[in-house]
Amino acid sequence: MTWTAGQRRAHRQLGFTLLELMVVIGILALAVAIVAPALNRARLGLMARSAAYELAADLRAARAAARAANVERVLTLDLTGRRYWAEGVVGARMFPPNVKVELAVPESERIGISSGRVRFFPDGSASGAKVVLDDGRSAASVSVDWLNGDVRIELRP
């Protein structure tokens, strides 16, 4: 097969030089170095929100179990151990390590300095509570209405 001068030139230009490949890899490495920390900060901002949604779902499950079985159900929050549970409904769950947790319950539901419980009654009412979760970048509060046992989440930037 005979090649013309134009075909030889076109045939030689089909690839990339090592220098071009190294420049592209350097640009990609720089982009990853800039984007990775930003993604980590965004993930940290979501920890309080995701923990609040999980806690709210478990509180709602305890309320539903109380109504379905026609018996009182209790969700216990232990801030020292950074966990909560509802016997027979929700197994022990841990709060994320970087999330600050504050608990406000009626004095009759305090178990100690840093523990308390939320009672759900068969009629749907509850003892009431407010749990604030803060990861430093965002905060969320989970409230339980004492009158109707409604569980609500309020997100704050």
Image (spheres, helix red, strand yellow):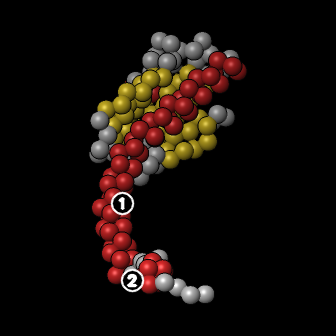
Q: Quadrant of residue 156?
A: top left
- 153 sits to left or right of 30: right
Please state the total of marks drawn on the protein image: 2
| Mark 1 lies on residue | 36
Give whichever of 155, 103 is nearer the camera: 155
At label 1, which amino acid type do we have?
Answer: Ala
Q: Secondary structure at mark 1?
A: helix
- Is residue 156 rendered to the left or right of residue 119? left
Q: Is residue 142 above or below residue 149?
A: below
Residue at the image point whose x is 58% and y is 23% from the top: 63
Q: Amino acid at mark 2?
A: Leu
Label 2 to label 1: alpha-carbon separation: 27 Å
Rate crowding at label 2 as few (under 14), some (14 to 19) or many (20 or more) other CA atoms within 10 Å.
few
From the viewer's side, name the closer residue of 7 and 69. 7
Q: Residue furthest bottom?
A: 2
Residue contact at pointers 2 and 1, CB within 8 angstroms: no
Residue 97 seen:
yes
Q: Is residue 12 visible?
A: no
Q: Which residue has dot 2 on it?
A: 18
Q: How far across and how far down the image is residue 110, in percent?
A: 43, 31
Question: SS of the residue at dot 2?
Answer: helix
The residue sitting at 69% across, 19% down in the picture is: 68
Q: Is residue 36 above or below residue 81?
A: below
Q: Which mark is residue 96?
A: none
